[in-house]
Image: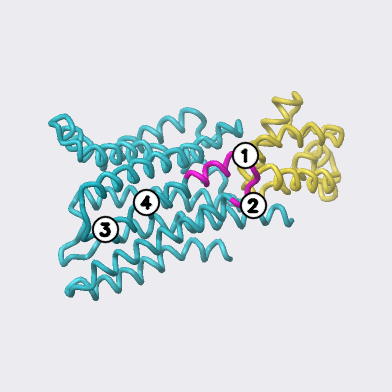
Chain colours: A yellow, B cyan
Amino acid sequence: MSGQTARRSGGAQTAPPSISEQVVERLAPYLGEFNAQVWVKVVAQRNLGLEPEDLSVADLEPLMEGLRPSLNTFMGRSAADGLLKKVSREVR
Amino acid sequence: MRYRWLALFPLLFAAVFAAIAWQLADGGGLDPFIHWQRLLVRVLAITGCFAAFSAFASGDHLRRAWFWLGVATVLVLVRDVIRMVAASGDAAPIDWTVSALGVLSNVALLAGVWMLARAWKVAAISLPGGETGVGVVTVLAALLALAVAGPGALKHFQSVVAGDWSALILLVSAVVDILSLCLLAPLLLTTISLRGGLFAWPWGLVTASMLCWLLYDAAAAFGGALAGGFPLTALFRGLAENFLFAAGMAQSFAVRSVREA
């Protein structure tokens, strides 16, 4: 069940943010909300064949790898690597 | 906060420049002031470009972009220094050296702006409006660039065709200006896509720099100075170089802040 579905079906106040929401929240300060959402959505659909709200913890590693080329381009490989590791550590 | 100060710096610098230039416009001190101010803004721009360059690792796409922007500014600084030093020397060989440096600087600038402008392609991301949006904004930017730099390019082309090879550098400069200004579109759209994020700052400031070069070209097309002798082209050149300085520093700060997070 996705985070959004969980919120719709009750317990709206306590449902934790979905995996994609957590990743977007951590990328947005650097890339902006628009890019963070679009990049996560594109990688989820293109690389994993999933909608963002259907991502699970098991999808985190391929999601991070899918985001890596774009992040490498905009912030360099070293910074991108650090950010991806940080996101992987923090998102649950 | 430091990003806002970086964005404000070119405007504050321009205000101080304008105040001093107004004071000197009636006397004989304006030319030396403009020469030294030009060297200062070139040095600042070089500092910004290589600060950004040093923030990236070997092989990073934007490291190459900032390298070429820095090289372009170094070459144009060398040209300015040669012009100043050789003002009373043998003009003929100096003219060719100055022309060659001008051409090389323009080519390096175009290479740097081109690499920045195609970062979204390298990153395989979508820009706001998609391919159609990029196409429409590019056509608008191209029309604007042609309106501003086109008449000059045509005039220099006619001079070259008539056998005046000294106009070649001016023709190359005008063509490079048009091509660089066309690249405003992807720079602007990349900035919009990054809005709200730290990395919007360097992109926004580079876009501002390119817009100021557009204003510089427009001012040059109308003679370069306002009534009363106020040096409008020098003002816009200073703004363009200082926005490049600010963009480079912002790029460096943004990359380092991700690393330290």
Return the residue at label 1.
A73
- The disc label shown at residue A18, or none: none
- Quote the CA–CA distance across marks 4 and 2: 27 Å
Q: Mark 3: which amino acid?
A: Ala
Which quadrant, please, contains the N terminus of chain B? bottom right
Label 3 or label 2, whichever comes before in sequence order: 3
Q: Quadrant of residue B30?
A: bottom left
Q: Residue at x 42, y 63 (%)?
A: B10
Return the residue at label 3.
B86
- Quote the CA–CA distance across marks 3 and 1: 43 Å
For the residues labelled 3 and 1, say whether their Cβ atoms are less than 8 Å apart: no
Return the residue at label 4.
B76
For the residues labelled 4 and 3, say whether their Cβ atoms are less than 8 Å apart: no
- Quote the CA–CA distance across marks 3 and 2: 41 Å
Do the residues at discs 4 and 1 belong to one chain?
Answer: no
Q: Residue at x 33, y 45 (%)?
A: B102
For the residues labelled 4 and 1, say whether their Cβ atoms are less than 8 Å apart: no
In this picture, residue B25 sits left or right of residue B139: left
Q: Residues within 10 Å of mark 4 (few under 14, many from 20)?
A: many
> Residue B226: image x %, image y %?
19, 61
Q: Secondary structure at mark 4?
A: helix
- Quote the CA–CA distance across marks 1 and 2: 11 Å
The chain containing the residue under callout 4 comes to: B
